[in-house]
Amino acid sequence: MFLTGSCRRFRRSAHKTQTQQQQHVVSMGAVESTEGEREPLLAPRPPEEQGAQPVNSSRVYGRRWVVLTLFSVLGFLQGMVWNTWGPIQNSAKHAFGFSTTDIAVLVLWGPVGYIPWLLFMWLMDKKGLRVSLLLTAFLMVLGSVLRSVPLTDLQLRRWLIHGGQLLNGLAGPTLMSAGPLLSTTWFAPDQRATATAVASLVGYLGAACSFLIGPLAVPAPNDTQIVNTITHWDPGHIRDRIQLVLYTELGVIAVFFVAVLLYFPSRPPRPPSVAAASQRLSYRSSICRLLSNMRFLMIALAYSVPTGVVAGWSGVLDMILTPVRVSQVDAGWIGFWSILGGCVFGVAMARFADSIRGMLKLILVLMLAGASLAATWFTLTCLTRLTHLPSTKATLYTSCILVGIFINSSVPIFFELFIETVYPVPEGITCGVVTFLSNLFTGLLLFFLTFYFTELSWLNWCLTGSCLFSLLLILFFRESYDRLYLDVFVSV
């Protein structure tokens, strides 16, 4: 049902009771929520009250696209830096003496950066987006500087690289959690899901580009080439190419840190919707509300388990595909197209969700069903000696790309459903909790990888099981749309 149709029916039936209005929300595909869940909302005030503007006097500003662009580019760069080493793990081993455990730990620093997530969520709630993003950009610059120091002592150089990856990981909580807050603060209700999709998926696009940039800019050592070649790459030459990539990333990050320092307002002069102007719960009350809400915990697990597993799985995709004779460059292309497809499809589905309200659960069911089938296909294809399924480059490409499309595109839909379910809990706190859980599962997966790295088929089974587990939880989830209720019935 279109949002505009809901508004027209409300105008024709403004004299109906509150019970009939709640029944109307149910007709949009939502289960009615309790009065307590909507209790803290700020009701419209008359214009003459203390000289204030009426709540429904909303406005959107063209500068919102500048704000979204700056935020998204930083997310893109953070994702690119996080995934620097996985796609070139063979080259990094030859150039810097990294072990397989080192590569897993370099990827693990991303989830480890989420340990102080409560501090970042408090800062976002109390100080706003500008202060949070400035701190995030500064951590990214400092981390990139540490990674780029050209020391000849490889032992000390490895320690600096690990430290730089940790600082970049500390930038993750804000960039991965603040997308829904930015969209609510700056965008109208019919653009919120789209803005959330762009802000939350561009970080994945950065990781995808590292799959492409790394293998193309850094040559693979000759013993990882699957094709017939006698080319021998000197470790010093490989090290110089990696250094060029690190310098380039440092320069771009520094430029956008200056851009955010010059211009990034926390909020517009006037809110774009009633929901953006409404009262929210305090920081402590929000945490208590989230941890005691079983429906939220249910959908939080449905989001965090598959996305966490996919993040760890994609970070070591080259290690997974090497036993099936896929080269470093081909593995990079597979990772690139899987994430790029998820970003494009995710924005398209978010735009669809903006047009047809109250359909978030159905969209997620379809996505997770597709992800389960694709993950099963990929897992069985990698076990071709047992299943006798054809294991070709085409089947590996197709199944892996489909996994990325379905899982990554579900992220903004999950975020919007989180906000609708627990409103009026602030968006940054809500998404901070679920992204922390997602990174927790990523960290657990990579932690076990440091011990069980000789045979990696168990990673594929974890991927398949996580998708099926999430699908089961979503099927039993009862959806509600409290924020949509406010924007439809209070703003008209």
Image (cartoon, rainbow, N blue to C red):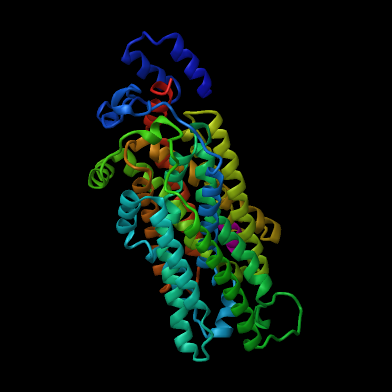
Against 389, residue 243 (above or below) is: below
Is residue 152 in view from this perspective? yes
The x, y position of residue 257, in whole percent, is 50, 63
Q: Position of residue 413 (x, y in %)?
A: 48, 41
Nearer the observer, 416 or 462:
416
Residue 404 placement (x, y as % from top left): 57, 52
* Magenta portion: prevailing SS class: helix
What residue is at 57 percent from the left and 60 percent from the top?
206
Q: Within the magenta stretch, is there residue 380? A: yes
Q: Residue furthest bottom?
A: 153
- Taking the spot 52% from the left edge, 21% from the top edge, the residue there is 4
Camera-nearest residue between 442 and 385: 442
Q: Residue at x 59, y 52 (%)?
A: 377
Q: Where is residue 356, by image quadrant? A: top right
State the quadrant of the C terminus.
top left
47 or 156, nearer to the observer: 47
Which residues lie in the magenta part? 379-386
Seen at 41% across and 46% down, the residue is 302
User: What number of labels is visible?
Assistant: 0
Q: Quadrant of residue 334?
A: bottom right
Image-based side of 481 in relation to 391, left or right: left
Residue furthest front in the image: 51
The relative height of residue 372 versus residue 136 in the rendered view (above or below) is above
Residue 155 position in % (x across, y down) = 46, 88
Question: Is residue 182 part of the magenta span, yes or no?
Answer: no
From the viewer's perspective, tell me whether residue 214 is left or right of residue 112: right
Q: Is residue 355 above or below residue 419?
A: above
Please state which of residues 168 and 297 is positioned toward the viewer in this rendering.
168
* Whether residue 408 can be seen here: no
